[in-house]
Image (cartoon, helix red, strand yellow):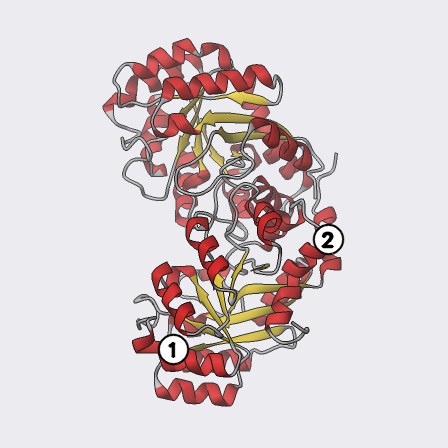
Amino acid sequence: MSPSNVELLSEVASWNLMDANVHLGRSGIHGQLALEKSALLAEMDRFQTRRALVSHFAAEEYDISEGNAALARDMDGRFVPAWSASPEPSIVHELERLQPKAVRLWFSPLHHNFSSLPWSTGKLYDYLQQRSALMVVSREELDWNALAIILTEFPKLRILLLDVGYRSDRYLLPLLQTFPQLYFDSTTYVAHRQLESFVETHGPERVLFGSRLPLYTPGAALAVLATARISDDSKLAIAGGNLRRLLGELPS
Amino acid sequence: MRSPIPVVDCHGHIGTHPDFPAYKICPQEMVCVMDLLNIESLAITSTRACYNDCPRGNEEVDSVLRQYPGRFRGYVTVNPNPEGEALQQLERFAHFHQPPLIKFHPDLHKYPVNGRKYLPAWDYANQTHAIVLVHTWDSDPNCGPLLLGPIAREFPGAHILLGHSGVTWRGYEQSIEVARGSPNVFLDISGSHSHRTIIEHCLNQLGEERILFGSDMPYLEAAMVLGRVLTARVSDGNKEAILRHNFLRLLTMT
């Protein structure tokens, strides 16, 4: 017997994989797990990941403008930038220049410490909605009630919720049924047969493959998708088709 | 994707869970998933017992062991809170396995793993060379891995599996520290956090014999942990040890 990862990664090679949850650059919290551009690309190669929606640790942990500049400096043809933003007018002005397809928000006091509610961030939501930019946010950054308010007041704002966790279904599923513009990534959707059961019941369109690279190994999320007893078309949609459609690269 | 080596899994459950919907959790469906992934056998604890009712939960494990011989092994789950119940349960269900498999869940039972009321069960484990699976979490006052260091030295006959290895990266570091100080401590790599390079790190620090595959099925997705191991930058021999041989060796120790 000779265990290897060949079977998993050869299957993934045909998926045209696009990862919705990737971080770039130095991190003050995650130390050696964080990867600069060349090392991150090498790790993507290893896991057959062709492209990724990428945010920068500098924007998450330190300064939004500096983080966006670092992301621009480190840009690669395989990265789709998830630019960071806050409600401040200077940042919104900066977004105009960046012409964003995806914008990542960091609400929590540990990050950029602003309210997710419309009285604080409504103008930014309106801007993103008008230019059809994808709002990207980690579940850890906002509570479910705030998410419901945003989805209600901005019905054309498409939101990608990352890191939903495996205990989330009693919140996540009603919101997905009520708000067609809500999507989530698969990184931490890892209860027993949870992804498989979701697709059987709700179809594959609302879930996007994510790995949390470089903090997590993509081997985990890839194995969950590879072993889900769902159709090949469903796997391809989750593996990248859904994200490409949200970014306007495929017809919706 | 299927494991190329038959897996011997040290951490599983039967039953539902209160805090999120359960999918495909009946033993028959679990066996289908085990076949899909090539998990030869799964050591199970009753989730009901981890929450509120050890006697009934252990009876449910007994029933599953009889229904699926060879596919499941049974932990006797004990709760220190009704004093005296732990030893009764261990004696009543002593037929589950020899050496005994014992499960402690100090987090859900809200009692510290090094507390006085656990001592009779630790003493039993020491005398019977039991395998004791303890739920652990980074720095938790009831089940932080560092609490197990003195226990492991006081009860050297017990083989202690640090369930989830403390979960977080820091929890893993605490687990490694405890295992380095006590040869009867082992890391169970089940858990919801898929830290990149953690398998490699544990092997570098402890060698291959102290790391055991656990899935936490049907609570967590077994394929997630399998993917971590199969894609780790370690040798095929290391993977075989983790996925199969290390737990098998403990199961046959007396």
Q: Amino acid at mark 2?
A: Asp
Residue A24 drawn at (x, y percent):
52, 69
Element assignment for label 2:
helix
> What is the chain identity of the residue bearing mark 2?
A
Give above or below for A15 relative to B245: below
Residue A237 x/y as whole percent: 66, 60
Q: Quadrant of residue A238?
A: bottom right
What residue is shown with label 1?
A: A63
Q: Could you say which is closer to the camera, residue B194 or residue A29?
A: B194
Q: Nearer the viewer, mark 2 or mark 1?
A: 2
Closest to the observer: B154 or B91?
Answer: B91
Q: Find residue B22 and name its label.
A: none
Q: Are marks 2 and 1 on the same chain?
A: yes
Category of crowding for the residue at label 2, using alpha-carbon neighbours closer than 10 angstroms: few (below 14), some (14–19), many (at least 20): few
Q: Chain of mark 1?
A: A
**Which residue is under mark 2?**
A232
Residue at x 43% of width, y 13% of height: B128
